[in-house]
Image (spheres, rainbow, N blue to C red):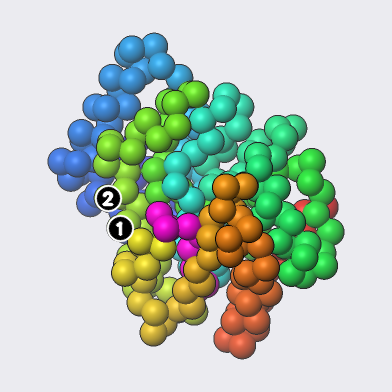
Amino acid sequence: MTDKELAGNWGKLLAEEFNKPYFCELQNSLLKEKENGNLLLPSESQIFAAFAATPLKQIKVVILGQDPYHGIGQANGLCFSVNHGIKPPPSLVNIYKEVESDLGVLINKEDGDLQIWAQQGVFLLNSILTVTANSPGSHSLFGWQLFTDKVIQIISKKNQNVVFLLWGKYAQNKAHLIDYKKHLILKAAHPSPFSAYNGFMGCKHFSLANAYLHKNNLREIDWSIA
């Protein structure tokens, strides 16, 4: 993995990170996993898919996940998103329910690929960018958080009027990386079935995000999934 794999100006902005000791150790950890015969997810070509789909200057909304889905065929490099043809996982189903309830828009609940959001400026970032198949959280100590924390800081510094959707305590712990004077931070429970009805359902984050974008003369996000 090198800065050449990052789209647009992401590569230049993050080039220093690739040369830091923690990133070299991260790469070694991934290599050891592969040498041990473990399948890493998402595929290597999709690890930086969120960056390719949403260049820095186009970011309007950031949704922060934890780590990729660990089921084979699910992860595609965008947080909460799955490949076409894969059944949407429970957390994404609850996200869809909230979108429908909040905005009254049409959601095709059979399609879990969120590329259509990413192309409109929704940066779908996992804090940890890889996982070993069928082993949730297996790369949590590899150092990805150092890399993605830097990404969050860059967005906060370089952009204006971005909406950060922080769902669950893990994502909310990243709030200190964001300049709240320049951006809107919205917090709610995680959309997982274990917590969705403790504050995610009914949070209206999608309409609140669009209202903020409209107020700042930015095009609203079409959250529908046809």
Q: Indicate the amino acid at tag 1.
A: Lys
Quadrant housing residue 150: bottom left
**Label 1 packing within 10 angstroms: few (<14), some (14-19), many (20+):** some
**Magenta extent:** 162-171
**Callout 2: SS:** helix
Residue 190 vertical placement versus 202 (above, below): above
Is 91 left or right of 182, judged from the image as shown? right
Image quarter hosting the N terminus:
top left
What residue would you read off at disc 1?
A: 150
What residue would you read off at disc 2?
A: 146
Is 116 left or right of 38, judged from the image as shown? right
Quadrant housing residue 156: bottom left
Q: Gap between marks 2 and 1, in whole Å?
A: 6 Å
The percent coordinates of residue 64 (x first, y second) are 48, 56
**Callout 1: SS:** helix
Point 47% across, 74% down: residue: 185
The percent coordinates of residue 175 (x first, y second) are 37, 68
Q: Nearer the viewer, residue 110 or 195?
A: 195
Q: Does residue 42 belong to the magenta stretch?
A: no
Q: Indicate the amino acid at tag 2.
A: Leu
Q: Nearer the viewer, residue 114 or 10?
A: 114
Q: Mark 1 and mark 2 in contact (Cβ < 8 Å)?
A: yes
Is 42 left or right of 119, judged from the image as shown? left
The percent coordinates of residue 79 (x first, y second) are 54, 47
Point 56% across, 53% down: residue: 195
Q: Can residue 79 be seen here?
A: yes
